[in-house]
Amino acid sequence: MNTPRQHLPVLNRWMGDAPGHPLRRLLDWTTSQPEVVFTWWRDPVLTVLEEMLVVLEQARPVGLDSMARDFRGFDDPSWDGMEQFLRHRTELLVASLLAESGVPFRFNTAPGGGPDLLLDSDPACAIEVSSRSPKSLFNLSQVLGEGLRARGLPATLTITADPIPPVEIRSHVRDTIVQRFLPPDGSPGVGQLRVMAAPPRPDDGIPASWVTITHGGPGITSYSAPYDSPHMTALARSVATNVLRDKRKIRQSQALPTLLVVDISRSDLPDLRCWEKTFERLWEPNDAFLGLAAMVADPNQRTPTLSFSVNPYADPDRVAHLASQLSECPAFGPLQGPT
């Protein structure tokens, strides 16, 4: 490792010496420019992480040592390994917001699960942190590009979607696309393909999503959708189905009054402008979380953007109590409004 330990000291200590840690390439990236001593210098991804960890170490919440051990245990430099690490980073980010604001909490390290962050309040309440990273256009572009490069072929791909981008490409359709562009027998693949990536959902007003992939062209993957697009409804539906009503999440929501925070940063179009209005139609009477916050967290910045939807079936007193416990944390300020 070419980075002296006195620089980014907390991050270096948390990372340890695992050669395949997902952050290792950022620290050890080399350059041919002789005047550049440390290529990581002022890298915003690394400096933001250092700041987060410094805040947490100053607050010393219970369970921090366990989080540090988990941080050090990541040893997979692939994209899948980075995805796993980023989920861990999301929990640390939310925790650092609480710590910086002086909100007392602890990490839940008890066996058997339960919400991630336990607020030191009476009565007790909690925050569960999760992520939704559906495999859609960005992931497809990555897979096809890597496959083309491995075959010594130009990796320029142009991908467009109409009338809206898919939140998640159906797995069998994705497999078909990969096989058509990267035939298993090594023969040349197709130059262009148009497929239905996601079926219509007429009950939700969501049209079918068609994707066109071209080998060549300007090399741009387009994720655009109009304001208040049905794409947002589809993304909210995906969060409701795959996170809010996941069996494990349901058990966590029933353990004690809990706010669910879902990081949607790694979806293709993480637009939060209509989130509250979109999600208010999706709550069901059996949902036990007090509310849901969709979060977009830029890895280059300390402060994420959150958009809140309060469960209309939840006990208003419990919601008000949770909001009061988080009132000192600016990122959770909007939670005060509906109460």
Image (cartoon, grey):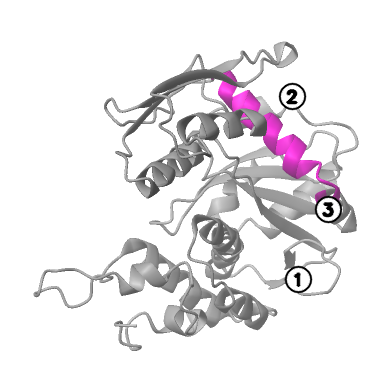
Q: Residue at x 60, y 34 (%)?
A: 175
Vertically, is 105 above or below 152? Answer: below
Vertically, is 25 above or below 310? Answer: below
Find the residue positioned furthest to the left: 35
Left or right relative to 1: residue 269: right
Circle 1 Cα neighbour tier, 10 Å, few/some/many (<14 / 14–19 / ≥20): many
Q: Quick check: marks 1 and 2 in contact, CB under 8 Å?
A: no
Locate the C terminus and report the quarter of the image it occupies: top right
Left or right relative to 334: residue 17: left
Circle 2 Cα neighbour tier, 10 Å, few/some/many (<14 / 14–19 / ≥20): few
* Type of the residue with mark 1: Asn
Residue under numbered circle 3: 248
- Asked if residue 272 shows in the view, the reply is no
Residue 166's disc is: none
In terms of image quadrants, where is residue 238?
Answer: top right
Residue 108's disc is: 1
Secondary structure beneath dot 2 equals loop
In terms of image quadrants, where is residue 169?
Answer: top right
Please check the rendered image and state whether residue 240 is part of the magenta-colored stretch, yes or no: yes
Q: CA distance from mark 2 to mark 3?
A: 23 Å
Residue under numbered circle 2: 281
